[in-house]
Image (spheres, rainbow, N blue to C red):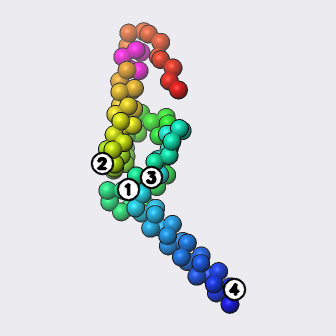
Amino acid sequence: MTRLLALFAGILLGGLLMYFSFSYHIVTTGQKTYYVPKTKAQMADFYVDIREWNHQNWAEHPELANAMIKAGHGELVQRSLTEELLDSIFKKVGGQTPVRK
């Protein structure tokens, strides 16, 4: 009986994890973790660490960028684009790239 109960508990837990992975992005910035609802059900981008992301990474993950903006966390997407632009300007004028925390 305990094996059967463990089997059902495992099935239930697996189903809940699959539902969560199809419904939410887990996005970490190093300082905070966000649970962002997905705009469409898919397994892609379940867990994402955006600490080192630049504009190319955001371009490769438009669904995540859309979901972040819809959830009210667009400043994280915008900040990465702005930082990349500023870094490229500093490199062109020969200045030192600012150190960010």
Judged left or right of residue 47, residue 73 is left
Amino acid type, residue under disc 4 in the picture: Thr
Q: Amino acid at mark 3?
A: Tyr
Task: Give the x, y percent position of residue 92.
Answer: 38, 13
Q: CA distance from mark 1 to mark 2?
A: 9 Å
Mark toward the start of the polypeptide (3 vs 2): 3
| Residue 70 in sight from this viewpoint | yes
Left or right, 49 with respect to 92, comes to right
Q: Position of residue 2 (x, y in %)?
A: 69, 86
* Mark 1, residue position: 37
Tell me whether circle 3 and circle 1 mark residues in contact (CB < 8 Å).
yes
**Pointer 1 with pointer 2, Cβ within 8 A:** yes
Q: Residue placed at 53% from the left, 38% from the top?
A: 31
Give the label on residue 35, or none.
3
Q: Earlier in the sequence, mark 4 or mark 3?
A: 4
Q: Say if 58 sits above or below 41 in the image.
A: above
- The label shown at residue 50 is none
Residues at marks 4 and 3, CA–CA distance in whole angstroms: 34 Å
Give the CA distance from mark 1 to mark 4. Answer: 36 Å
Magenta segment boundaries in residue numbering: 87-91
Q: CA distance from mark 3 to mark 2?
A: 12 Å
Q: Contact (CB < 8 A) between labels 3 and 2?
A: no
Residue under label 2, please give it: 70
Q: Residue furthest bottom?
A: 1
Other-residue count near label 1 (Cα within 10 Å), few / some / many at <14 / 14–19 / ≥20 = some
